[in-house]
Amino acid sequence: MEYSIDHKSSVPLHIQVENLLREMIKQPEYKNGKFLPNEVELAKKLGISRNTLRQATNRLTYEGLLIRKKGVGTVVADTRVNTRLNNWLSFSQEMKALGIQITNYELKTSWEEADQVLADFFRIPLKKPVFKLERLRGGPERPFVYFISWFHPRVGLTGKEDFTQPLYEILEKKYATVAKLSKEEISAIVADAFLAEKLRFKPGDPILKRKRYVFDPGSRPIEFNIGYYRADSFVYTVESER
């Protein structure tokens, strides 16, 4: 396969590189766990900066198509492993299915300039305003999760929506935006003073942190979400079948 891009094209370089990478990872020499060419060498061959190449690889990494191995390189993910869910529910729907009555303790909307993480994920200019939704939620006794979500400007959220309703129902019914694919990263952290105050426990206590990258059926980014859960009130269960 010949690796080249058109520097005279009106299509942005990082989009061209992204499309090229999508074609590359389909090739037998790169499928399922094989390493991509060295970043420096590939950038030089294409006549682009490493930042432009990294912007494209970030996108495919977010989608779970590539995996970065620190100090080693970038490999193509095993395409037999898929994050598409047939029965994906919003938090409100999950809790309803479990018979848990949800209380909304805080709900705040605002606009925020995109930092590098949001700009890379949404593929938008740095500092472009994005809609931000913060929610503190839990049971009748106390809050147990603090959510922060940012949404692609394309979705069209305004802040006037009734966010006490299931989020993905709002997106689908009002904005014809369907959440289809989710990539999640889960880690354990300790509460700082801010989170301890929000979740009503002590600084240093354990918290489950969940990052969620949400895409529509066309694999376009919709939402970047971070959830902070009280470790004594929430268990994250993964069910696998062989």
Image: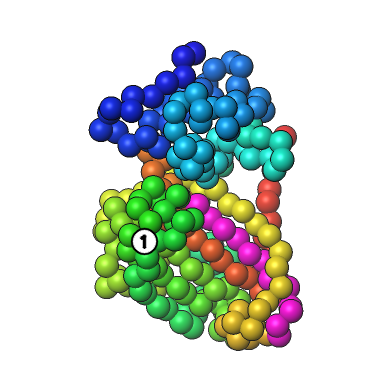
Whether residue 168 can be seen here? no
Scheme by which the image is coloured? rainbow
Towards the viewer: 134 or 41: 41
Classify residue 72 by image quadrant. Answer: top right
Residue 225 among magenta residues: no
Q: Amino acid at mark 1?
A: Lys
Residue 66 placement (x, y as % from top left): 58, 36
Q: Quadrant of the C terminus?
A: top right
Q: Residue at x 35, y 51 (%)?
A: 124
Q: Please determine whether, in this image, residue 221 is positioned above or below residue 188.
A: above
Task: Give the left or right position of residue 173, taking residue 224 as reference.
Answer: left
Residue 205 among magenta residues: yes
Q: Residue at x 27, y 73 (%)?
A: 160
Q: Please determine whether, in this image, residue 88 is positioned above or below residue 109.
A: above
Task: Give the left or right position of residue 111, taking residue 228 as reference.
Answer: left
Q: Residue at x 37, y 65 (%)?
A: 113
Task: Give the left or right position of residue 33, taking residue 166 as reference.
Answer: right
Q: Please determine whether, in this image, residue 153 is positioned above or below residue 27.
A: below
Range of magenta residues:
202-213
Whether residue 115 can be seen here? yes
Per the image, label 1 sits on a secondary structure element best described as loop
Q: Give the total of numbered labels.
A: 1
Residue 198 placement (x, y as % from top left): 57, 83
Towards the viewer: 143 or 71: 71
Residue at the outermost top position: 1
Where does label 1 land, which residue?
Answer: 127
Magenta stretch prevailing secondary structure: strand
Residue 135 placement (x, y as % from top left): 47, 74
Q: How dense is the environment of label 1, judged by Cα within 10 Å: few (below 14), some, or many (20 and up)?
A: few
